[in-house]
Amino acid sequence: MQRLQILKDTFFGLSAVQQQQLLIGSAVAAGGIMAYIVYKRKKPRTIPFGDGWWGVGEKTLSEDQKIYPFQVETSDKEIEDLYERIDRTRYADPLEDGRFHYGFNSTYLKKVVSYWRHEFDWKKQVAVLNKYPHFKTKIEGLDVHFIHVRPPHRENQKVLPIMIVHGWPGSFYEFYKILPLLTQSCDGVVFEVICPSIPGYGFSEASHKQGFNSLAAARIFLKLMERLGFSQFYLQGGDWGSLITTNMAQMKPQCVKGLHLNMCMSNRGFKVLLSLLIGPYLPFLVGLSREDVRRLFPFFEKNVFEMLRESGYFHIQATKPDTAGCGVNDSPVGLAAWILEKFSSWADLKNRDLEDGGLERKFSLDDLLTNVMIYWTTGSITSSMRFYKENLGTNLNNRVDFKTEIFVPTGFAAFPNELMHCPKSWAQIRYRNIQSYTFMPRGGHFAAFEEPQLLADDLFNFVKKVEKS
């Protein structure tokens, strides 16, 4: 009775236009529910594992399955070439009061580049990169790079293997601040961490053939875990890493003990439409919380217009990556601007209002430039951009993975400044076994880089819940 009274009071408290919108939404809901029940069919619980060959030429009869130690290296010649290119940079003058609304402000860019040229110590950062053990192994014709960090040996601790996967324009280096947290025991639980570079990113060889998408990356990473001797393990990912790890859980759910994500791509369907119609007025009826409403609405401003303002790179990389790649692969300053603009706005869209893009509020220039240098020294920016075209060249909704639900235990860390918010009720459309969903108090797209302690705590809490179940 109390809930009915709330409904009544809420409805008659709306304006005439809002009441009309709600009634239309209810009519849509009534017909939609019946259509949904008829349409709903039992969906497959796994997707095909398949096989592939991405190396040069024809597939070989056998493949070297050994794992080789690897070290990041540099040379005076490499650094001299970088400096020469930086010194020849031609800058465009910024607009008055343009801040970061037109992209990376060139006034601040000059300050970043001056630091890069005169203070940043790449040799020192190479030593930092080599702090953890690096390896390479050949899978499906490609040299796959990864770091493998084991926890210190202690009595009475449960060691759990986990693979953590980066996205664009990040790298394995994003995880260097969270690695010490994950490899230290928390209530008797500790992780053994495998952190690969997506093929085409950093020190992982790029595909020589068309079609290398998230499904291919997922299969390669599953083969990597098998080669390392892990039959069961946890997964964590954001950005492209969230899609790759999701595909891994769909291909071999028996191997994935749990899947933890800090970015979720939900299906757009009837349930989402109903949420958008009714959610602003009666959120509890469609499974939305007050925090969901705060993050989602007004929907078109936050999820349509904002994405249009922020997705220019997306369309370029999903259509003509090689064209844009010509410029940023040749100019270190162009590369830095292309990459670092994302670390500004994706950490917090409000940073666009600042002269310096708020870049150093969350990150140090040493950390940011180390990530840029991984792309620069490996010449991998173009191949990393191709990953967008390979995944988005066709309608994602028609792919087998987007038609297949995920049944492994799943946890979500929903950071407030993530580009698009996905409520738990939306995530449940695809992820059918959500064990934890946390509204994180702060942080944006680069969760492990921005808020390593928050992400580590949420990951440990999720895993401990799964281990007890």
Image (tube, rainbow, N blue to C red):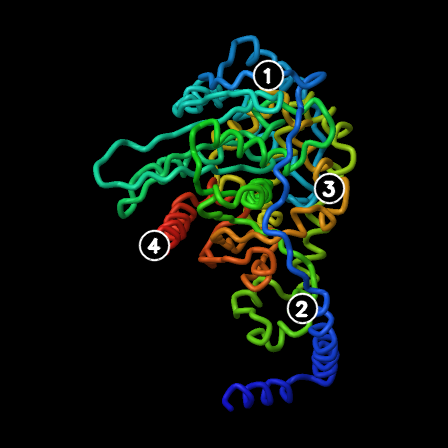
Q: Position of residue 101 (x, y in %)?
A: 68, 46
Observer-nearest of 4 and 218: 218
Q: Nearer the viewer, mark 4 or mark 3?
A: 4
Read off the residue under disc 2.
Answer: 276
Residue drawn at point x = 56 percent, y = 64 percent: 425
| Label 1 vs 4, first from the N-terminus | 1
Asked if the residue under mark 2 is in contact with the one under mark 1, i.e. CB atoms within 8 Å, the reply is no
Residue type indicated by callout 2: Leu
Number of the label disc, if any, that sits on residue 62: 1
Q: Helix, strand or loop at disc 2?
A: helix
Q: Quadrant of the C terminus?
A: bottom left
Asked if residue 172 is positioned above or below residue 376 in the image, the reply reads below
Asked if residue 100 is positioned above or below residue 92 in the image, the reply reads below
| Label 1 vs 2, first from the N-terminus | 1
Observer-nearest of 448 and 70: 70
| Label 4 vs 2, first from the N-terminus | 2
Number of the label disc, if any, that sits on residue 468: 4
Residue drawn at point x = 42 percent, y = 30 percent: 229
Residue drawn at point x = 48 percent, y = 44 percent: 256
Q: Nearer the viewer, mark 1 or mark 4?
A: 1
Q: Helix, strand or loop at disc 1?
A: loop
Residue drawn at point x = 64 percent, y = 89 percent: 12
Residue type indicated by callout 4: Lys
Q: Is residue 233 left or right of residue 314?
A: left
Q: Helix, strand or loop at disc 4?
A: helix
Asked if the residue under mark 3 is in contact with the one under mark 2, i.e. CB atoms within 8 Å, the reply is no
Residue type indicated by callout 3: Leu
Read off the residue under disc 3.
Answer: 392
Q: CA distance from mark 1 to mark 2?
A: 53 Å
Q: Helix, strand or loop at disc 3?
A: helix
Q: CA distance from mark 3 to mark 1?
A: 32 Å
Q: Position of residue 126 (x, y in %)?
A: 46, 20
